[in-house]
Amino acid sequence: MAKYRHDLPQHRGGIFLTDGGMEITLIFHQGLELPHFAAFVLLDSADGRAHLKRYYEAYLRIARQHGLGFVLDSPTWRANPDWGARLGYDAAGLKAVNMDAIRLLDELRSTWESPRTPCVINGAIGPRGDGYKAGNMDAAEAEAYHSAQIAAFAEAGADMVTAFTLNSINEAVGVVRAARTQEIPVAISFTVETDGRLVRGESLREAIEAVDDATHRACEYFLINCAHPAHFDGALAAGESWVQRIHGIRANASIKSHAELDESETLDSGDPVDLGRRYLSLRRAFPQMRILGGCCGTDHRHVAAVCEACLPPEAMSA
């Protein structure tokens, strides 16, 4: 049974943390092999589940220490039909693993949640193709494509769903419409290039306003992920209504472009302290951005640095 589906606590104010770059962390820090960058395959073994639990607990510990809420994103960014087929999962197998991912998060919530640390269970959706390359689906095709994964999350008891690393307005519209059909809250997280625009050249403003117009503002909120703050902070304008729709940041550690990251064979963890300062600057300009986590190259050290930068001293000593 979903706990917060009809009353998401992140709408009530306060900072909510989330995790960092899951797949990068599991590969480079835990030495795991993730075929096609898919973390959901770890759910198929007791050892894999243990790795996932340890990964989440590093972040949950930070949230509990500082009395902050937490958004638990499922390890299912690749658990859609195209990527699943490459990994040997048919429709039934994908439904089972998506539902199992939500059950894993429910186990974590039962252990880590407290009155000061509400834990929201969020089904994570990835793009149909490559998050760094433009997709070609229209909105109706995207709605049909993502509907099965969203239905599995809803059936398993997720509080909400979020599509991450989207670079296509049509795909975002389809995801929102599919979630609306399932009567589950949905958020959209766009990724941008070094110029602060989507890969086809649309601005964040154009993307957010287009999704809101096409879905009658059915999206709970928007986020930005898989880009360094230096890539998008200049694209944001204080006081404009569309910016108020952006409630979260999951930035990359590295200032490198997507193309450079794709070609890199080593991990670029950037500077956690500098990243924390950049989050603080964004929070000061846009205080509604209160869902804070990381993406490629980030781990629990970066999220801890964000806490140290963004929380008042009395909160850090709590």
Image (tube, rainbow, N blue to C red):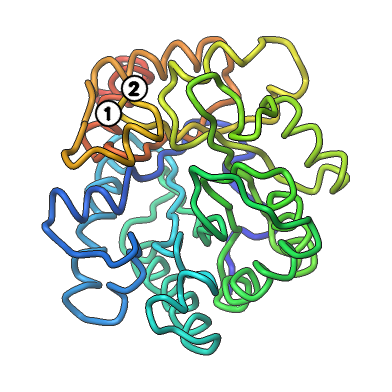
| Image coords of residue 85 (percent x, y) | 47, 79
Quadrant (top left, top right, bottom left, bottom right) of the N terminus:
bottom right
> Which residue lies under the disc numbered 1?
318
> Which residue lies under the disc numbered 2?
255
Quadrant (top left, top right, bottom left, bottom right) of the C terminus:
top left
Residue 159 versus residue 312: which sits nearer the camera? Answer: 159
Query: Mark 2 belongs to which amino acid?
Result: Ile
**Residue at the image point whose x is 53% and y is 57% from the top:** 129
Question: Mark 1: few, some, or many residues within 10 Å (few <14, many ≥20)?
Answer: few
Residue 275 higher or lower than 184, as above or below: above
- What secondary structure is found at the residue carrying circle 1? loop
**Residue at the image point whose x is 32% and y is 36% from the top:** 261
Residue 191 versus residue 107: which sits nearer the camera? Answer: 191
Residue 103 versus residue 167: which sits nearer the camera? Answer: 167
Residue 160 in the figure: left or right of residue 117: right
Task: Find residue 139 and report its image quarter.
Answer: bottom right
Residue 90 is tagged as: none
Query: Mark 1 belongs to which amino acid?
Result: Ala
> Residue reaching furthest bottom?
92
**Residue at the image point whose x is 41% and y is 39% from the top:** 17
